[in-house]
Amino acid sequence: MKNRLLALFAFIVLFSFVPFANAATPRQQTSKTTKSATQAPRHGLSGTWAPANGAGDGIQANGVKAMPNDGKPEHQPPYTAYGLQAFKSHHALEGADAVLPGFYDDPRDKCEPLGFPRMNFYNLRETQILQNEYKTAMLYEYGTAWRVIWTDGRPLPKLAQGGVLINGEVKEPRYYGYSVGKWLDDTTLQIDTIGMMGEDRVWLDTAGRPISDQLHVVEILHRVDRDRLEWSVTIDDPKMYTRPWVAMDKFPMKLEDPHTDVMEQYCSPIEMEKYNTLFGNPASGPGSRPQGK
Amino acid sequence: MKREVIALSALLMCISPFVSLSAHHGTAAFDNEKKITLKGTVTEWFWSNPHCLLRFDVKGDDSQIVHWIGETQNPVTMVNGGWSKASFKVGDEVTVTLNPVKNGLPLGRILTAELPSGKTLDANAGIRGNVYK
């Protein structure tokens, strides 16, 4: 009797962890006989995803993919007066308004957390997505950073006093914000995020575009088929921008082999210091091309 | 003279905070139109973020040794391109092609590196990809 109880207990413990490993697995297994092998699973994003056009596509060194800071007027975000002032106060190393290498102040190179949504807009590389019935976790390669999106039907919190209001309590702003996801159809997940760290702590992108504590980000992740995912991001920040604008438009990701070993890509102050001493500082010395706003 | 020393000190105090920020450079530092090829001996292969660094000594026509440093991409990109932490060891004879920096110092961004085995590593292989359609 005791052995049977132990076996039952072990069975329950084992299966209680299976859904988080891959929520779509049962659905995928039952549908295998009826659906095309290349069809997207219903409400399934689990897997390791990488930029379909190669790793270089996700670096976005000159700013967000859909609106790089390349000097073209059509790629200028619709700044408010305050937003433009905030942008000009940032000294980016890349893009049409880059400053001399010795005079930039990107928090990235102080090994500060990239924060959200910049983690979508800088070195977007192999990204692991894990789901269960309550939440979707996204594990980013750069910065070995992760974020959690609630998909249990809860409402998006409301902005309050620089943070968010949850169950009557004001919660602190977070580098990666507060995210809630809902399925628009079988293969399209909308993620709404608010409550991020704003100006002075997190930049929107490597070109130095600003965000504020009023930022609301809307992401659409559409799984086109089993092997493809398209990722769009809209920025809505009335403090910095006069209207919502698209920063990433159907950015293509491809499904990797599930055995893919994702490396760490980190910012180490020790390595950064040695790099700067040996190379960064002397390379940035007299003779470098001046640019700047 | 005293006034000049004070002025110089004030100037250095103003500049020093910015000098300490000097760091991870952008593309502006390199002469992308210029490629040079150097034969040298590896003294260090520094596998690190934000960029890996290959230090190697090159003997000039006057027999003087010049200590060169070439940077590559970050480790993740280099692994994607077939490089590794074990790609070089101290004492290896290598042939390096790079874009030098504009200011004339013996620094540059590596394009390719030929190993003692004759194998050539492409520093940009890890960031290329096929176009998604």
Image (cartoon, coloured by chain):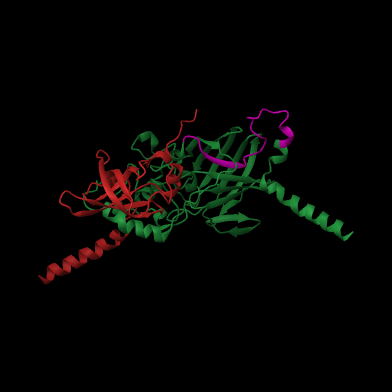
Chain colours: A green, B red
Outermost residue to the left: B1
Residue B109, percent from left and from top: 31, 46
Q: Quick check: is A32 in the magenta stretch?
A: yes
Residue B6, percent from left and from top: 17, 69
Q: Main secondary structure of the magenta part?
A: loop
The correct choice, above or below, for B13 with respect to B66 in the image is below
Residue range in magenta is A29-53
The correct choice, above or below, for A222 with respect to A278 in the image is above
Residue B104, percent from left and from top: 21, 49
Query: Could you tell me if residue A100 is visible in this image?
Result: no
Instruction: Kindly identify the residue that appears in the image at 76 percent across and 54 percent down.
Output: A13
Residue B43, percent from left and from top: 32, 56
Left or right: residue B114 versus residue A113 is: left
| Quadrant that contains the N terminus of chain B | bottom left
Q: Nearer the viewer, residue A73 or B25?
A: B25
Q: Quick check: is B104 in the magenta stretch?
A: no
Outermost residue to the bottom: B2
Q: Nearer the viewer, residue A198 or A204?
A: A204
